[in-house]
């Protein structure tokens, strides 16, 4: 067992950057004031929050008053969807989304369905990208909201949000995008995208867990989600997670500054990984478009392998990765995203997601390319299904 | 939240007090809302030669009273009447948006005190 | 100007204890795993959360599976109220609360009123305590929920929750208590109190900001509030704020261990403060019951003084405190709590809340008793209303 961990699960979460933690520490120690108070200690905390808001606004090309802090991507998504659906229900009750959204979008929508809204789930193409025309075709007279993610968390595919937003705006429909996986990976400009709402979560770009933000374009009709005190200009109540917000602000500033360098480094590693896996292992496919994907994402399906076993064996080799197998969560269905791009359940079960980060090196990829074929072989040797295939000879998936 | 200038006037308010036998006196505001401002004027030949105030209210209310008295001292009645809450606010390097109503109080107090003076003149 | 700050606003927030931060730091650095993942790094994070859950359960005498982590007191209150109201609306649509609840309770209830629920706001007695009989009288056939705070955040009065819970249970009505101000100040035993739901927030007892918990008694019908991933046993989605949760767990453990010592120390200081202020200053009243109040809370009203000015002058003397004056927030109405106990608005405007903490000493109280009379006099000398009173001679409020 290697002692050092090779972390390949940056889509799940990232470590906090040193410079980010350094800016947070004062707000976890002596700068403990409540930002709503008027004495110096409170005013300092308030200032720190406002600086963070400015940094987020700058990174997204938003106005400062359009940024609201939340407890993470899930709250941002819940707020965006339930907040706009309820505030605009006099206009209509129809919502459009895709089949590959995160559960933080799908589950609030399911809830809205229960209380009288109708949701159309537009399928994606086999490459994991939604066709804007299919969104257009789904629009009805009573459509009030379209929610499509900017980048998928499992297969990394980047969605054509700008085109979808244009379609939405022609019909005066509110458009939300879940950018939780996209921030820090690809450039984001809310004005250029033409969107009304955007969700993000700090821990996906080297910030702390438990803090996120929602961009709300000025003039967007939305209800508050957390009601109480007057924080966040009466739109999001609760004593602010000052240290977390400060961390988010610093993390997005750094991410934005290093974006090109970061992306091109990871993309090179990713391509090496993809080429290596596809050439070294049989009965494997790459999930999601080969090019229109996040620079740090590679997602494979190995036939005759079950994802959880794969992860556990990788773990013993000091490698942390993820799978879309239902067995990792103990649920019955494998990843809805893999099914949505047309995978058979048995193939979806054998999936492996590798998401790279700034700490990863070429040596890490080499190491993975060394141990992965062994592990896959080992598991296949144990599989009763592989037996018969071997006898019949090679085939491609 | 408050500018240095607001805090400076709040901590060291100018012209606090009363003027006995003032030529113009007025009290504006409402204690229920937390603010009451009373303005005393001494006027000679149409010029405000002395001014004093008393204020019950927030930092902004006290600071605006203070700077407003400075702004009208030595001015003619006509000039003093032209002073707006905007001018008072600007002289303090701005106020938080939710405190703008406090600066209106200073403008009202000046106007009401001058009106009192003019009424007294009429009735003489 | 004194350089050292004397912090008298522990009801607003508290500094994180050193031992608490120390337990958090690993989860802000090398232990960055996502608790939902199955490799070692993730399992470690998961374990840390489960230890925290155990600690909270122990402190409240709850079962471990009855504790859910949230982003703070506001989310706990929003979830408790909206989650139970919506899940039980088939039984009825009437809710009972008091006039002195925190806005994190009142505002979600206002929202529920908008969507078809009815809320009865039971008034409190002049001492700031609600009479359980008045709660009983407010019960109707269709009452589904009663929410009464355990201790008030402004005047510190402790409410008779055990009696109220008994009344609720006789009628099979769900009973929630907002214990955000009570945790770490008075002993809390959810089984003994007989309640169904209890909200708490870590930053009020020397834990971090942006993390809280909701106790949900087994069998309580409640909807999830944040929908998404399967975290918190499908009841509260979102990647967990691991470091925050760890901090909450440690903070409540310490608070509970030191409860008696802490409370009796603060109570002594509080009594010295109350006696001092009442004897040294004229035209002053103590708000809230003299005895049935939190050990760390003193709340006064000074006539002919406006609260914000008072706070600003105290700030220049290095003292951080709070007020229920509307002017501190720029809103029109002074504290609804002070109005609810019968204060005239002009008296409510002159209020000062001093909330003590473990860092406070007798010298701090002496210092406050030295500067406060001067500051009050200074402000009164500037008040046009005090003028006339002085001329008429002394009077008591
Ligand atoms: C696309 C997407 N949306 C939303 C979320 C939810 O974010 P969080 O877990 O930080 O609440 C995640 C990550 O878990 C995600 O990948
Ligand atoms: C009684 C009470 N309830 C709820 C809250 C809300 O807690 P938080 O601000 O941590 O969300 C507070 C404190 O602000 C409080 O004092
Ligand atoms: S085989 Fe055990 S959960 Fe899938
Ligand atoms: S006097 Fe109340 S806000 Fe200024």
Image: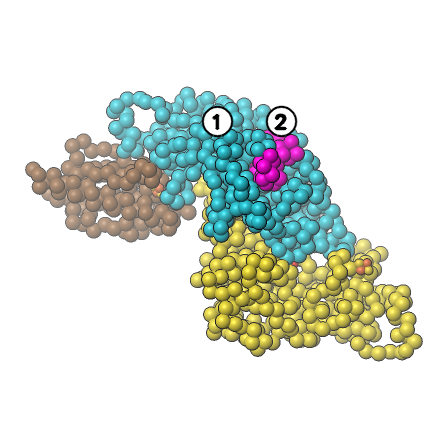
Chain colours: A yellow, B brown, C cyan
Which residue is rendered at x = 15% and y = 37% of the image? B23
Q: Is residue B98 left or right of residue C161?
A: left
Residue C289: give its label: 1
Q: Is residue A164 above or below residue B84?
A: below
Q: Is residue C348 left or right of residue C296?
A: left
Cα–Cα gap, marks 1 and 2: 21 Å
- The magenta span reads C168-197
Residue A87 visible to the viewer: yes
> In which quarter of the view is residue C384 placed?
top left
The spot of residue C24 in percent (x, y) is: 66, 45
Quadrant assignment for the N terminus of chain C:
top left
Q: Secondary structure at mark 1?
A: loop
Farthest residue, direction right: A391
Q: Is residue A210 above or below residue B122?
A: below
Q: Specify whether residue C107 is painted magenta.
A: no
The spot of residue C188 in percent (x, y) is: 62, 32
Which residue is rendered at x = 37% and y = 44% of the image? C332
The spot of residue C208 in percent (x, y) is: 60, 43
Farthest residue, direction front: C141
Q: Is residue C317 left or right of residue A28?
A: left
Which residue is rendered at x = 49% and y = 61% of the image? A89
- Camera-nearest residue between C146 and A159: C146
Q: Is residue A29 above or below residue C363?
A: below
């Amino acid at each position: 067992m290697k002692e050092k961990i090779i972390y390949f699960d940056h889509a799940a979460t990232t470590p906090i950057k040193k410079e980010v933690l350094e800016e947070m520490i004062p707000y976890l120690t002596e700068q403990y004031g409540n930002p709503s108070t008027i004495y110096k200690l409170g005013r300092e905390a308030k200032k720190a929050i406002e600086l963070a808001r400015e940094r987020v606004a700058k990174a997204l090309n938003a106005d400062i008053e359009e940024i609201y802090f939340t407890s993470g991507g899930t709250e941002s998504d819940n707020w965006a969807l339930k907040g706009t659906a309820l505030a605009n229900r006099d206009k209509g009750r129809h919502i459009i989304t895709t089949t590959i959204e995160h559960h933080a979008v799908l589950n609030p929508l399911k809830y809205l369905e229960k209380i009288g809204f109708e949701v159309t789930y537009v399928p994606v193409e086999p490459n994991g990208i939604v066709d804007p025309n299919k969104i257009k075709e789904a629009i009805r007279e009573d459509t009030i909201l379209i929610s499509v993610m900017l980048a998928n968390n499992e297969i990394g595919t980047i969605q054509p949000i700008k085109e979808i937003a244009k379609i939405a705006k022609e019909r005066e429909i509110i458009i939300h995008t879940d950018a939780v996986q996209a921030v820090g990976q690809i450039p984001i400009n809310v004005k250029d995208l033409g969107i009304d709402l955007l969700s993000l979560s700090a821990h996906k770009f080297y910030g702390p867990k438990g803090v996120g933000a929602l961009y709300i374009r000025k003039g967007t009709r939305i209800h508050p989600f957390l009601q109480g005190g007057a924080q966040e200009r009466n739109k999001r109540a609760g004593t602010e997670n000052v240290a977390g917000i400060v961390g988010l602000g610093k993390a997005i500033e750094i991410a934005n500054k290093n974006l090109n360098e970061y992306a091109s480094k990871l993309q090179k590693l990713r391509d090496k990984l993809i080429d290596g896996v596809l050439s070294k292992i049989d009965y494997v496919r790459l999930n999601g478009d080969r090019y229109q994907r996040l620079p740090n994402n590679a997602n494979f399906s190995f036939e005759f392998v079950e994802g959880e076993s794969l992860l556990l064996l990788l773990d013993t080799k000091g490698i942390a990765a993820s799978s879309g197998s239902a067995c990792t969560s103990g649920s019955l269905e494998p990843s809805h995203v893999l099914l949505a791009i047309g995978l058979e359940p048995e193939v979806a079960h054998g999936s492996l997601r590798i998401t790279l980060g700034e700490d990863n090196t070429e040596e890490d990829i080499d190491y993975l390319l060394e141990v992965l074929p062994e592990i896959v072989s080992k598991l296949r040797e144990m599989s009763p299904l592989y037996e018969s295939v071997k006898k019949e000879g090679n085939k491609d998936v | 939240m408050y500018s240095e200038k607001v805090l400076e006037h709040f901590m060291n308010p100018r012209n606090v007090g009363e003027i006995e036998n003032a030529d113009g006196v007025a009290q504006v505001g409402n204690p229920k809302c937390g603010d009451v401002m009373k303005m005393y004027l001494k006027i000679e030949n149409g010029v405000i030669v002395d001014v004093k105030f008393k204020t019950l209210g927030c930092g902004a209310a006290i600071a605006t009273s203070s700077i407003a008295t400075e702004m009208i001292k030595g001015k003619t009645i006509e000039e003093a009447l032209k002073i707006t809450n905007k001018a008072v606010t600007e002289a303090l390097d701005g106020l938080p948006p939710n405190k703008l109503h406090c600066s209106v109080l200073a403008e009202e107090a000046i106007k009401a005190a001058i009106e009192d003076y003019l009424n007294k003149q009429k009735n003489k």
